């Protein structure tokens, strides 16, 4: 480095050195913490805070908001008062579109499944067959009634753009058991949710922790086949890029963006060998494929079945966090402001058998006890109609379920009022969901923090409690 280069780089730093020296003293409370250097391999496995129950998470994201009163929270009173005005029964909050119709009964019957007697609607007969493995939380609430902010809140713990997704937090805290695949994989079913790819972002965490988008099917990733004539030529290109990047780091010092780029280039090189093996399902038995529904006449069922099968294969290979997005059915996502029966049935038919197949396959392979499966959308729906045959957004009550590692199956937790409109018992927040997930992964959500913008930030913000009533 020449003298001119040194002065150009350091001209604003001399006063900063003095300021850092002062702020590090006891008189200033030692409020500045030294940022930990980036690990050589950001996804190298890390020791959790305590003994974990789960080693991986599969998040089955139901984009749009499944109706709780039509799925896992039966309300006979809706049948008795079908067609009556909700204003005569309870206080009606303003909704997204504020087209308040009459009370609407569920178009589907509910049946009891398993030894636990869990009531599940006819939308989900296959998932119902797994009732004794599910812990259904009927008292979830959200902070936002609109898709974009609610999606950010569900994924990142805050309703604004730019924060790290829960998958990124998990990989930051634990790393991954497979250095040849990303630690956080999003399986694209055809629908990018409102809020876009920022739902899967690493935010202010290093870019190595962001979600990698895979497509279920023959072409899982673009450019997975190398274009170079030989492996040696590709290695020489990679070595040249690393040399250039490291030369820059030698001049400017620690730079998270450059270090992440180096790691991502190296990971991409290794993925060209590991991804084709991952996506080759020729070794799967025909019975396994049928279990997931890959022989279904419904193309959307076949597509989601491929996602669920790929999720199981990713878990087998030590990938830490896998999220599945919804297939693009004819009725779009679970957001039926009209034609509720048609839309919910199409979406349910696409995901019901593949999800049940995933749970049963995980159990058969001994993976269920170490994999946490979460089924959730961003909010619920109203017990009264929007117009005549739809349901509007309802953040005051919705249902989710969890299964697998550390979960007490055959459990229902919390409750809503007689209309399924508001959570009234064991009210559970998104922060509680995140805290419970991290707990089962062996992490204390209060201690999993990252220093950014002058404060230690965590996924659960300033809230979160473990949902102990659903734990084994």
Image (cartoon, helix red, strand yellow):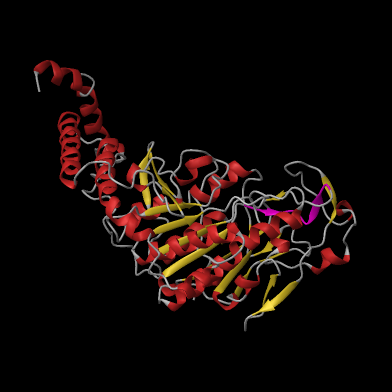
In the picture as drawn, the residue positioned furthest to the left comes out as 2
Query: Which residue is pictured at 17% across the width and 43% down the height?
Result: 235
> Quick check: 9 left or right of 73?
left
In the picture as drawn, the residue positioned furthest to the top comes out as 4
Query: Which residue is pictured at 55% across the width and 40% down the height?
Result: 195
Quarter residue 283 falls in = bottom left
In the picture as drawn, the residue positioned furthest to the front comes out as 229
- Which part of the image, by quadrant, shows the N terminus? top left
Q: Position of residue 111 (x, y in %)?
A: 72, 75
**Nearest the camera: 153 or 267?**
267
> Quick check: 78 left or right of 345?
right
Residue 67 visible? The answer is no
> Quick check: 308 left or right of 144?
left
Q: Does the magenta stretch include residue 299?
A: no
Q: Is residue 10 above or below residue 287?
A: above
Q: Where is residue 110 in the image (x, y as percent from the top left)?
A: 74, 72
Q: Where is residue 137 in the image (x, y as percent from the top left)?
A: 61, 66
**Nearest the camera: 57 or 53?**
57
Q: Is residue 255 above or below residue 437?
A: above
Query: Which residue is pictured at 53% across the width and 39% down the height?
Result: 160
> Quick check: 274 left or right of 69?
left
Quarter residue 23 falls in = top left
**Nearest the camera: 415 or 333?**
333
How many marks overall? 0
Query: Which residue is pictured at 58% across the width and 58% down the height?
Result: 376
Which stretch appears magenta? 379-387
Q: Where is residue 282 in the image (x, y as percent from the top left)?
A: 39, 66
Residue 132 visible? The answer is yes
């Amino acid at each position: 480095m020449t003298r001119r280069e040194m002065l150009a780089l350091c001209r604003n730093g001399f006063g900063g050195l003095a300021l850092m020296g002062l702020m590090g003293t006891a008189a200033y409370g030692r409020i500045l913490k030294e940022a930990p250097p980036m690990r050589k391999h950001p996804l190298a496995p890390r020791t959790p805070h305590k003994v974990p129950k789960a080693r991986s998470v599969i998040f089955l994201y139901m984009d749009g908001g499944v109706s709780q009163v039509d799925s896992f929270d039966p309300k006979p009173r809706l049948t008795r008062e079908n067609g009556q005005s909700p204003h005569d029964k309870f206080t009606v909050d303003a909704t997204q579109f504020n087209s308040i119709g009459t009370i609407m009964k569920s178009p589907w019957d509910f049946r009891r499944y398993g030894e636990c007697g869990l009531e599940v609607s006819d939308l989900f007969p296959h998932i119902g067959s797994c009732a004794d493995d599910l812990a259904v939380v009927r008292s979830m609430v959200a902070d936002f009634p609109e898709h974009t902010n609610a999606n950010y809140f569900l994924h990142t713990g805050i309703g604004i753009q730019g924060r790290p997704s829960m998958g990124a937090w998990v990989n930051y805290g634990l790393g991954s058991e497979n250095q040849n695949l990303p630690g956080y994989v999003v399986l694209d079913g055809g629908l990018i949710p409102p809020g876009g790819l920022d739902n899967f972002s690493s935010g202010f965490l290093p870019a190595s922790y962001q979600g990698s988008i895979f497509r279920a099917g023959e072409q899982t990733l673009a450019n997975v086949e190398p274009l170079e004539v030989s492996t040696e030529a590709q290695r020489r290109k990679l070595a040249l890029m690393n040399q250039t990047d490291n030369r820059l780091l030698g001049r400017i010092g620690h730079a998270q963006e450059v270090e992440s780029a180096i790691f991502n280039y190296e990971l991409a090189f290794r993925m060209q060998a590991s991804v084709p093996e991952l996506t080759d399902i020729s070794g799967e038995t025909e019975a396994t494929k049928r279990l997931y529904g890959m022989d279904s006449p419904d193309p959307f069922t076949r597509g989601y079945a491929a996602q669920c099968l790929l999720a199981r294969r990713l878990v087998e290979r030590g990938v830490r966090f896998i999220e599945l997005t919804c297939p693009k059915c004819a009725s779009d996502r679970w957001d039926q402001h009209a034609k509720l029966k048609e839309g919910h049935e199409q979406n349910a038919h696409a995901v019901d058998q593949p999800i049940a197949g995933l749970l049963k396959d995980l159990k058969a392979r001994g993976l269920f006890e170490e994999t946490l499966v979460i089924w959730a959308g961003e909010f619920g729906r109203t017990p009264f109609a929007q117009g005549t045959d739809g349901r509007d957004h309802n953040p005051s009550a919705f249902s989710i379920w969890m299964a697998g590692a550390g979960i007490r199956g055959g459990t229902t937790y919390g409750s809503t009022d007689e209309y399924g409109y508001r959570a009234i018992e064991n009210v559970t927040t998104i922060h509680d969901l995140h805290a419970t997930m991290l707990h089962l992964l062996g992490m204390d959500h209060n201690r999993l923090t990252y220093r950014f913008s002058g404060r230690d930030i965590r996924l659960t913000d300033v809230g979160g409690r473990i949902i102990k009533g659903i734990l084994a």
